Image: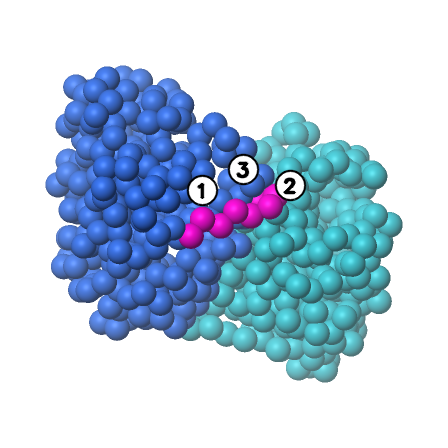
Chain colours: A cyan, B blue
Amino acid sequence: MPFEILKKHKTFDGETLFCEHQSASTKTKMKFSVYLPKPVEEIDSAIIWLSGLTCNEENFITKAGAQRNLAGTNTMIICPDTSPRGLEIPGAEDDYDFGTGAGFYVNATTESYRENYQMYDYIVKDIVGLLKSDFKVQKLAISGHSMGGHGALVIGLREPQLFTSVSAFSPIVNPVESPWGHKAFTGYLGDNREEWKKYDACELIKAGHSHPQFLLVDQGLGDEFLAKQLLSKNLENACENREQKVQLNFHEDYDHSYYFISTFIGKHIEFHVGHF
Amino acid sequence: MPFEILKKHKTFDGETLFCEHQSASTKTKMKFSVYLPKPVEEIDSAIIWLSGLTCNEENFITKAGAQRNLAGTNTMIICPDTSPRGLEIPGAEDDYDFGTGAGFYVNATTESYRENYQMYDYIVKDIVGLLKSDFKVQKLAISGHSMGGHGALVIGLREPQLFTSVSAFSPIVNPVESPWGHKAFTGYLGDNREEWKKYDACELIKAGHSHPQFLLVDQGLGDEFLAKQLLSKNLENACENREQKVQLNFHEDYDHSYYFISTFIGKHIEFHVGHF
């Protein structure tokens, strides 16, 4: 097997695994976690979960409670780390919103980052490849939170043939218009804003990209990042103008935390499992 | 209100709170977390959750997924920290299994610890008092994990009138016979083994303590601490000899982690809510 199992915990009759493998895209070792509700031979589908800023492969699998919803199904979940690590790129450890733990799911083109920060390819090639070859999974869905919600929407819209359904929690829907996006895209992609638009869900929809299934998005109205960084309404507008279907659910008082995700993850898993 | 709310997260239609208060027993500020499934006026009962070694007020409320099971009930859960903190007692920060994060739910009598390490009283007086006076709760249950499972059994057996039901995950059932117990009891209580027995579930049962309800205990058979530290079978034997009822469920392959707790916490909550 081209990945190593570092830890294994029986969970809801299945197994939570922490793994490591060599990535061809990032040219580094990368960690990911997995929940297998049943023996791997019985698994036929997978949800890829992309985490947000500062997260690694542990946050979602520890805090979201998704195992309870996946138990008994034939669907696994895989949670990759959010950037390459241990590279000692000057500046990559300075901020929570850039560099380590903040790969933004782009293929970097700037000098310091292009060698390893190929997170778009890491998901679409390495992780998808691993799921198909090692877990023998036929059907895929993608979801994520915040920066990872951005990643899920962008990857789902650019690769609709790969994913039967796409969802997101509190996604950065329009990073070319948000401070987090500006900073990350400048650092990873340079100043050419046309390049940025390839990694922006709203811009992709405006440019004609679409997914045949409706996009499921949940967003808390008590989320401190909503007004400045996440800009959910821009997604609604972009979808309306291009007839991409979206179900954008706003929730009074819920914030940006895993307490919000844990409350609604069951609905997202139902959505994805129901469309496989 | 005699406690301060530090953070608040809407969760499953209720609220997860992180709080701080001044403890009369430990003479320090102490933190705890709470989940209120409904507005506080509708809450009538509480489960006290005692965490294990190295934990603080966050671990359970973040990882166990208990909110999902409590949602819709009139039962809250409260998760106190596992020791006083910030005291600068020489040696109290050196080990994971003694001092900070390892209060063992005893009232310490040794010179360095007796002033503040009054964790038995902190639970039975401060936390119970807070629940009755501030949350207006009528009915109480107690549960916990590992060191906290030990705490729940000991407190439940010594104060049966306070708690309608008692449960534990992977408890240290017989600390006078385990290395963790030896170290903690020597440090907090000195060398008099008769003092130790007041904080040992098996010894309490042998001495005639009992709880009218059966004790619910879940234990993983893949738990690395089972043979040397937890000694679950000793509880079964002690209960048999004294006719204390116990339901001790062993689970193939499950380990000592929160993945195990999350799998079975629903059954414990059902047990406690069902007996209020």
Is the C-beta separation of discs 1 and 3 under 8 Å? yes
The residue lying toward the viewer, choosing from B202 and A165, is B202
Quadrant where the C terminus of chain B lies? bottom left
- The percent coordinates of residue B130 (x first, y second) are 18, 54
**Neighbour class for label 2 at 10 Å: few (<14), some, many (≥20)?**
some
Whether residue B248 appears in magenta in the rendering, the answer is: yes
The label number, if any, that marks residue A8 in the structure image: 2
- Helix, strand or loop at label 3? It is loop
* Residue B223 visible: yes
**Neighbour class for label 1 at 10 Å: few (<14), some, many (≥20)?**
many
Q: Which residues are magenta?
A: B247-254
Quadrant where the N terminus of chain B lies? bottom left
Q: Chain of mark 3?
A: B
Whether residue A171 appears in magenta in the rendering, the answer is: no
Q: Chain of mark 2?
A: A
Label 1 or label 3, whichever comes before in sequence order: 1
The amino acid sitting under disc 1 is Ser
- The percent coordinates of residue A112 (x first, y second) are 72, 34
Badge 1 and badge 3 in a common chain = yes
The secondary structure making up most of the magenta span is: strand
> In the rendered image, which quarter is residue A177 located in?
bottom right
Cα–Cα gap, marks 1 and 2: 18 Å
The amino acid sitting under disc 2 is Lys
| Image vertical order of residue B245 relative to residue B13, above or below | above
The label number, if any, that marks residue B170 in the structure image: 1
